[in-house]
Image: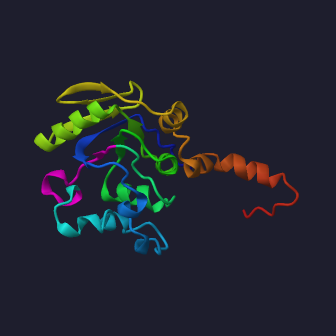
Amino acid sequence: MAQTISKITTVTGRGIPLLGNDIDTDRIIPARFLRCVTFDGLGENVFADDRTGGNHAFDQAQYQGAKILVVNSNFGCGSSREHAPQAIMRWGIQAIIGESFAEIFLGNCVAIGMPCVTATPDIIGQLQALIAQSPNTDLTLDLDQLTVTGDSGSHPVSIKEGNRQMLMSGTWDACGQLLQGAEQIKATAANLPYVAWSR
């Protein structure tokens, strides 16, 4: 049975503010957690060292269950570990809004279907303040309209057009595309003399 391609056009949910520039991948998921064979369990260790004080946003009761992370500039810089967006996603985050992102981190997010959009520092500051004051407020990130909407109104966001199209069309999901084309793959392989296709 073919798998349905996962198209991502909107993400709605409560937000979580994470203040600070240049938050690198070693802070997001420390190197000692990279020895895992699968990504399972990474969510509980996201920001492990930063959370030792017990006052990190990811530990605060009002932000549990949040789906949209709001960050500042150069988020995800440092080493190019794909574990960093995996850890964030497995904690429960489905989209990130920030001033700017490190390029490799951004690519790793798109590869797992997690939109990363940018907004001006002023808009980011407004969103972080709104979330801090009213943590139960739902935000809606709309990739079609390129907006983020909340109690403070609607704000413009940006995303590379190629990434936007991949997310909205579902072509970010390489495995899903392969599974959807399984019958075509079998038919092609059956006609190749060097492939012994198992039936």
Vertically, is 160 above or below 67? above
Residue drawn at (44%, 66%), measured in percent from left and top? 39
x and y percentages locating residue 60 in the rendered image: 16, 57
Would residue 120 be found to the left or right of residue 184 on screen? left
Give yes or no for residue 87 being in the magenta stretch: no
Q: How is the image coloured?
A: rainbow
Q: Residue furthest right?
A: 193
Q: Residue furthest front?
A: 21
Pick whichever, 176 or 71, lies toward us.
71
Stretch of the chain drawn in magenta: 58-72
Q: Is residue 50 visible?
A: yes
Would residue 79 be found to the left or right of residue 137 on screen? right
x and y percentages locating residue 169 in the rendered image: 52, 35
x and y percentages locating residue 8 in the rendered image: 43, 38
Would residue 171 be found to the left or right of residue 25 on screen? right
x and y percentages locating residue 147 in the rendered image: 34, 27
